Amino acid sequence: MILFKALSSKTRLKMLKLLTKQNYHVSGLAKVLEISVPVAAKHVRILEDAELVHSKTFGRTHVLSLNREKLYEALETFGESYEITVQKGTSILNVLKEVAGVKIKRIGDKEFVVSIDDEEGFFVYEVDGKTPDVPINDYKLETDGTLEIKRLVPVVKKKLRVKVKDDAVKSPR
């Protein structure tokens, strides 16, 4: 599979990591990675063949960006799949209680998924590819469907350095 070939190189993984932060021209990637432009271009072609990067052309310049959807799709391959039968009106939270490896914690009058297969984190759920606007313990299943529980992976989209100034004027003593 071309995807695994694309991910098998440390150089290409470094390129993908750089592209998570900003778009690059091939020569920009080459400079940051301290490799020649032809070598960088060869790696980029492999990433393009695997559809992990997009290339936009502006005149003679090619600007590369990460295809996040393809990367997420690749990672989804490793997720587990189950089939379970429940009564109509069962909450998703109660469905998850039937699945091995799902740990649920009660905080006050609410219950939350806190880990799956010992991987702690924050989790969101989707029903048939859509994110409902009700808490997981309030969503009641009325028809057959596909439920996905996804752990939010901490990816820095924006990093802010905040400086707080004290406007209070200190009186001299």
Image: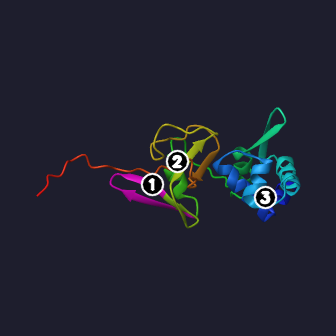
Residue for point 70% across, 50% down = 19
Q: CA distance from mark 1 to mark 2?
A: 11 Å
User: Label 2 belongs to which residue?
Assistant: 92
The tag on residue 12 is 3
Helix, strand or loop for the magenta stretch, by majority: strand
Mark 3: which amino acid? Answer: Arg
Q: Position of residue 54 (x, y in %)?
A: 78, 42
Magenta stretch in the rendered image: 101-113
10 Å crowding of disc 3: few (<14), some (14-19), many (20+) = some
The residue at which mark 1 appears reads as 112
* Viewer can see residue 81: no
Amino acid of disc 1: Phe
Sequence-first disc among 1 and 3: 3
**Looking at the picture, which amino acid does disc 2 mark?**
Ile
In front: 38, or 150? 38
Q: CA distance from mark 1 to mark 3?
A: 38 Å
| Residue 87, image x, y percentages | 55, 45
Residue for point 59% across, 43% down: 126
